[in-house]
């Protein structure tokens, strides 16, 4: 689940503000902000992984972003990835 600031009781600073960025113009600056926010949250709250790559693709026909996070689990030295679709609702 993607959380925003204040979504989690007693952890109000844990979030990436992705919902807020969904309604910004779909341009390279928004993609940079999405990437930076995701990197910051993972680096701050999940020290067991190392980010290898974050790929963000705009899906204008779906009003969404397709986000692929490729990471390494440090303890097991394995590579994993997760794909998330963030969709704007009209």
Image: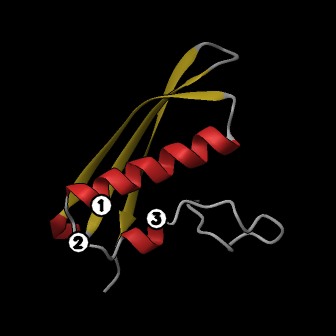
Q: Mark 1 or 3 closer to N-term?
A: 3
Task: Using the image, determine if residue 57 lies above or below residue 26.
Answer: above
Which picture quadrant has residue 65?
bottom left
Quadrant in which the C terminus appears: bottom left
* Drawn side of residue 79 relative to residue 45, left or right: left
- Residue 32 x, y percent position in the rendering: 32, 51
Disc 1 crowd rating (10 Å Cα; few below 14, some 14-19, many 20+) is some
Tell me the SS state at disc 3. Answer: helix
Report the residue that reaches farthest toward the top.
77
Which picture quadrant has residue 27?
bottom left
Q: Mark 1 or 2 closer to N-term?
A: 2
Residue at image location 23% in from the left, 72% down from the top: 25
- Residue 74 x, y percent position in the rendering: 64, 19
Report the residue that reaches farthest toward the left.
61
Colour scheme in use: secondary structure
* Drawn side of residue 51 relative to residue 47, left or right: left
> Which residue is labeled 2 in the image?
25
Q: Mark 3 or 2 closer to N-term?
A: 3
Residue at image location 60% in from the left, 38% down from the top: 43
Which picture quadrant has residue 54?
top left
Image mark for residue 18: 3
Label 3 close to label 2 by CB (< 8 Å):
no
* Drawn side of residue 15 relative to residue 37, left or right: right
> Which residue is labeled 1 in the image?
30
- How far apart marks 1 and 3 lie (CA) works out to 10 Å
């Amino acid at each position: 689940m993607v959380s925003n600031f204040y979504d989690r009781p007693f952890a109000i600073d844990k979030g990436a503000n992705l919902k807020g960025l969904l309604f910004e113009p779909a341009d390279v600056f928004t993609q940079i902000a999405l990437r930076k926010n995701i990197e910051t949250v993972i680096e701050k709250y999940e020290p067991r992984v190392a980010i290898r790559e974050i790929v963000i693709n705009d899906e204008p026909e779906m009003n969404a972003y397709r986000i692929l996070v490729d990471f390494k689990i440090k303890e097991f030295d394995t590579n994993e990835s997760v794909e998330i679709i963030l969709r704007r609702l009209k």
